[in-house]
Image (tube, rainbow, N blue to C red):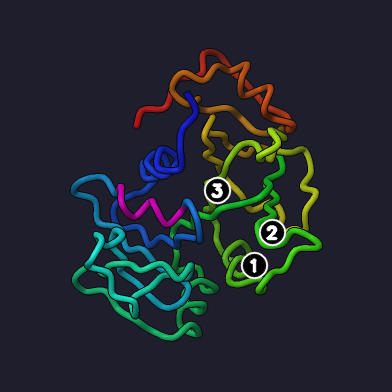
Amino acid sequence: MALDKIGIAKRIAQELQDGYYVNLGIGIPTLVANYVPNGMNVEFQSENGVLGMGPFPFEGEEDPDVINAGKQTITMLPGAVLFDSAMSFGMIRSQHVDLTILGAMEVSENGDIANWKIPGKMVKGMGGAMDLVASAENIIVAMMHVNKAGESKILKNCTLPLTGVGCVKKVVTELAVMEVTPNGFKLLERAPGVSVEDIIKATEATLIIEGDVPEMTL
């Protein structure tokens, strides 16, 4: 059974480490803040100028003035700080972020990412995506494996305008966990109930399969 977006976020939360400073992109990545392992201290950063984001607020407890980069209401943990976007991007560009978690429309087998524009469709702008992929050394992508037409978004080469080149380290989808290697995507884990054959069928890119591929534990 393929994962839903919450399942993807739960699996990515397992990649967090104590003491990490983590930037969460718009979309599925924002859900990761809800699933930090017990006892782990992680500082979540949002490019609009927040350090110390907590999980999403419960209904009725939202503060419309406290939002993330996707304009969603958030909570702030004790000790959280607010600052202007110039300082936020200074933090990103000077590589003070340990892990960046982004959404994507396409990822290629050599780690290219396309996540900001579909030609012909209205777009508000690049946002912080290009700064994040240019500066971050550890990028995990949270995305759906196929589009609504069932076509693979895990490709040999991206077809959409690129945000960054050769920067993605790992991809977590509703079907699989894959690591970018010099020879293509290495299949590390499969979603519960999803077969290796299902993943091969949904993947256009080169997929390296070594031995038995374990199921994810969530």
User: The disc labelled 3 sits on which kind of residue?
Assistant: Val
Task: Give the residue drawn at x 31%, y 52%.
Answer: 34
User: The disc labelled 1 sits on which kind of residue?
Assistant: Met
Secondary structure found at label 1: helix
The residue sitting at the front extreme is 60
Residue at which label 2 appears? 164
State whether residue 122 is above or below residue 40. below
User: Where residue 198 sits in the image (x, y, percent)?
Assistant: 61, 20
Task: Give the residue drawn at x 45%, y 62%.
Answer: 23
Q: Residues within 10 Å of mark 3 (few under 14, many from 20)?
A: many
Question: How many numbered badges does the structure rendering display?
Answer: 3
User: Where residue 199 sits in the image (x, y, percent)?
Assistant: 61, 24
In this picture, which residue range is highlighted in magenta? Answer: 29-35
Task: Give the residue drawn at x 71%, y 36%.
Answer: 149
Distance of mark 1 from mark 2, alpha carbons?
7 Å
Q: Main secondary structure of the magenta part?
A: helix
Secondary structure found at label 2: loop
Indicate left or right for 2 with 117 as reference: left
State whether residue 68 is above or below residue 90. above
Q: Residues within 10 Å of mark 1 (few under 14, many from 20)?
A: some
Indicate left or right for 43 with 5 as reference: left
Task: Identify the mark nearer the N-term, 1 or 3.
Answer: 1
Q: Quadrant of the C terminus?
A: top left
User: Where residue 83 sits in the image (x, y, percent)?
Assistant: 38, 84
Indicate left or right for 71 with 33 as reference: right
Residue at which label 3 appears? 141
Secondary structure found at label 3: strand
Task: Identify the mark nearer the N-term, 1 or 2.
Answer: 1
